[in-house]
Image (spheres, coloured by chain):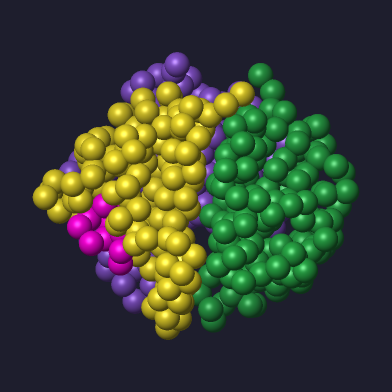
Chain colours: A green, B yellow, C purple
Amino acid sequence: MWVERLAFIVGSDSFEKLMMSIILARTGTAMDVETHLFFTFWGLNLLRKGGADKAKLSMPPLLRNLATWMIKRKMMKTGFKKPSEMLKELVETGKVHLHACSTTMELFGLTRDDLIPEVEDIVGAATFLDIAADADKVLVLA
Amino acid sequence: MWVERLAFIVGSDSFEKLMMSIILARTGTAMDVETHLFFTFWGLNLLRKGGADKAKLSMPPLLRNLATWMIKRKMMKTGFKKPSEMLKELVETGKVHLHACSTTMELFGLTRDDLIPEVEDIVGAATFLDIAADADKVLVLA
Amino acid sequence: MWVERLAFIVGSDSFEKLMMSIILARTGTAMDVETHLFFTFWGLNLLRKGGADKAKLSMPPLLRNLATWMIKRKMMKTGFKKPSEMLKELVETGKVHLHACSTTMELFGLTRDDLIPEVEDIVGAATFLDIAADADKVLVLA
């Protein structure tokens, strides 16, 4: 058996959930897997202009900024780029698709202009269920 | 391919996980999808009488009450009902099934009377694995 | 339909995510299900020597220690062993496989000696996607 299509629900804007999404999607592209990421609730913050690069580790406030800075520096040293650049590269492969949740857009009062250009479309839960139906595995990162 | 049956593990009592469960299940009912929700650990709080309507956003304590109140007000304005009413309506469609985790019931010292009447049964992990086996997709909201 | 193989991504080191992993994997062993657990990010802490037994509930700091102590005592009374012993027993069944994420090992500066002997191997996301491809269901506990 092989995976041809993955679907993720990204419901958190934490740095670790963002990195899990990026690393799994990127690994998928190298294995010819098509990945669909549906960003909802807090996850939608990652698609806002500048949002991905502001993501912080989910830790108590006092430690969060320092720990996030440390892990980002460490990741840069081991060859990772900035989250926004990694997202851009993923979309440019043509195998990774970023979807924004329409219900969350309305709740947060956001418009298309608030989102990075790499977002493919703004869709509702019904469209996501269609995408999920066609995926071999559906993972929730929330 | 199409989805006929979804299974969720709801392990959190946060407002956002509750809404993700409700919105996905509700969207499913309109597409003739049968959805099974297994509430475990903190998630079980959502099945306690009055529990779903008390769910709060997972945010730092100082902001949580205000932000939850704001998002609920916004949701009411865009046509959402109270969580308890939405759960009731979902179960009334006959397509959504609420299961309470028996291990958690015992750990928290709860009895059937503590739960809302919409709960279908109190089951263990083995029964959940059976339900999951028959589901096309299993999502964890925890 | 039946489940022959499950794959979990464990991305949190909280006590509740650990217990959900253990209970589902243990239930699986009794039903002849093979379970693969891939520990990444904070989840990797659970594979460090002494790590599983230090896992705490994800709650505000002031309540966390007391609540964790209470739930552990309650679980012991209802027949649960210490997390480290449960993990050991699971691996000894031959049906449960513990995988450590290589990217996280590098980020956290860990070596094989820092991990419990029950860990089967240290693998990257590509190997995990292979494992996931062969699994009937993939669950994310993060």
Residue depicted at x 19% and y 51%: B115
Q: As rendered, which of A82 and A121 lies closer to the eye?
A: A121
Is C113 drawn above or below residue C55 in the view shown?
above
Along the line of sight, the residue nearer the viewer: A96 or C51: A96
Kindly indicate the quadrant of the structure image that contains residue C109: bottom right
Residue C27 seen: no
Rendered residue at 59%/75% (across/down): A64
The correct choice, above or below, for C62 with respect to B105 in the image is below
Residue C89 appears at what percent x and percent y? 37, 33
**Front position in the image: C73 or B101:** B101
Picture quadrant of residue C62: bottom left
Q: Is residue B135 left or right of residue B113?
A: right
Q: Residue at x 74, y 52 (%)?
A: A121
- Horizontal and vertical percent for residue B95? 36, 34
Q: Is residue A48 above or below residue C26?
A: below
Labels in figure, total: 0
Residue C27 is inside the magenta segment: no
User: What span is in magenta?
Assistant: B43-54
Is the N terminus of chain C in the top left, top right, bottom left or bottom right quadrant?
top left
Q: Position of residue A142 (x, y in %)?
A: 54, 55
